[in-house]
Amino acid sequence: MSMAARILKIEKIVYPGRSMALDEGKVVFTDRGLPGESVEVEIVRDRKSYVEARTVRVVEPVPLRVEPRCSHYLACSPYQDMSYDLQLAVKKTQVEEILGRELKKSFSDIAIVPSPEIWGYRNRIRLRVVRDGGGGAGRVSFAYHEPGERAAFVPVDACFLVPDRINVLIAELRAFIDTEDWLAVSEVEIRDSRSRGKALVVFHLETAARLEEMAGKLADLHLRHPVTGIVGLVREGREVREESLGGAPRLDEVVRGVYYRIGPRSFFQVNVPILERVFDDLAAALDGFDDASIADLYCGLGTFGIFLARRVREVFGVESDPENIRYLKKNLQLNRAGNFAVCEGTSEAWLPEILEREVGAIILDPPRKGVDPGMLKALAADPVPRLAYLSCNPTTLARDLKLLAPAYEIADLRIYDFFPHTPHIETLAVLAKKRPS
């Protein structure tokens, strides 16, 4: 195949967000282009079974192409150039194709739940501090990494994926770092509480230099912005030390009547309005399990387990991270959840005992890498009546469902658009134990 630029027609967008075309029968993956568009590409690398390319320009746009709102959209939300209806259709097709390919069956009726809000929905943003003088002094800007690059950055003045009040706060914090020349600050993170309307400011620091001075300079920030607290996370080798710079070093959130205390390093879903929909669907999936015990593996702060504790006899929540466990225990106190047992350790270590307890259902919310194969084998060998698997990666979900298939049948599948304008996909698979044939 010639390495010269050529014009190709985009066939589809494949997970995780690459535009695919065919050139003389060979698959070409490029970075931009919507289904049906003709684009001019230049070849980056010609591999044995496919070609990597870069889109130079869109030659013939389709009507579903829209103007992106963020100037930096390719770095954080590359689906901004397509209509929201097309985004949903693309994600639905991707999940159906990935599951169909792995499980060797047709999936064509998976429901996709749109995000109730497609702008200003994110409750967290983390920005790199970039100085025009390189690593030392120089004018400060906030930035995201260039796609696929570690040392190249795209300036971010404001982001339409977070609420307006956060963008106002971002502007002041950038000016603060620029004016005072706080060289220790490498990143700035803002976490937002939708129910409280307040933010937690987190500075990622390379050293602990001038902490007291920084706290003094920021003492009146809460008078101009709805800020609950300011935290410095100081890197010390492989460890991170938390320092309060004013106010409360945490955030409070309420979802469907459940209170959550969230720390500066805690994981919490970024899109609360659609999280409420997941809560409702999980409750429906466990309808009839009122007298049963359930297990919430990878439970984090207790996001799902505490909500479900009000609907079942008992919850076993398994978590290994000490920081998460600290906030999990606090959240149990806040919600007076006396029927929630904290199991400190890994899900892999706790699963045999969980299965011995004959729980009625297990909630799985693993990281992107999916569930440990040993756990899947154990779940298939000793199946529970109901398994609810919330996945942030459809490829590992498909792989894991294949290992569970001998013991479970899929009772429900649905996709949640937690991340509008991005390629990210969340899928809930509700599995039921197969009846003996």
Image (cartoon, helix red, strand yellow):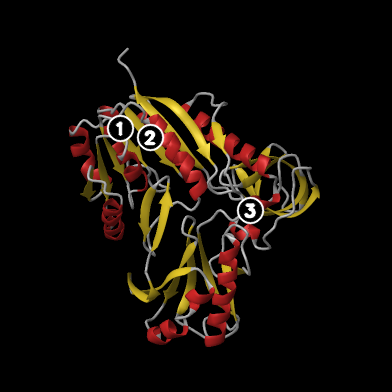
Residue in front for this viewpoint, 416 or 123: 123
Instruction: Point out residue 195 in the picture as x, y percentages from the top left corner.
Output: 47, 55
Q: Quadrant of residue 386?
A: top left
Q: Dots 3 and 2: beta carbons under 8 Å?
A: no
The residue singled out by tag 1 in the image is 361
> Can residue 3 be seen in this snapshot?
yes
The residue singled out by tag 3 in the image is 78
What amino acid is at disc 2?
A: Ala
What amino acid is at disc 3?
A: Pro
Q: For the C terminus, give its image quadrant.
A: top left
Q: Residue furthest top?
A: 437
In the figure, 167 relative to 5: above or below?
Answer: below
Q: How many marks?
A: 3
The residue singled out by tag 2 in the image is 388
In the figure, 35 relative to 242: above or below?
Answer: above
Check disc 1: other Cα within 10 Å, few if <14, some if 14-19, many if 20+: many
Instruction: Point out residue 331 in the picture as x, y percentages from the top left corner.
Output: 31, 54
Q: Which mark lies nearer to you, 1 or 3?
A: 1
Helix, strand or loop for disc 2:
strand
The residue at 60%/83% (across/down) is 139
Marks 1 and 3, how far apart in space?
Answer: 37 Å
Q: Is 199 left or right of 79, judged from the image as shown?
A: left
What amino acid is at disc 1?
A: Ala
Q: Dots 1 and 2: beta carbons under 8 Å?
A: yes
In the figure, 173 relative to 283: above or below?
Answer: below
Marks 3 and 2, how far apart in space?
Answer: 30 Å
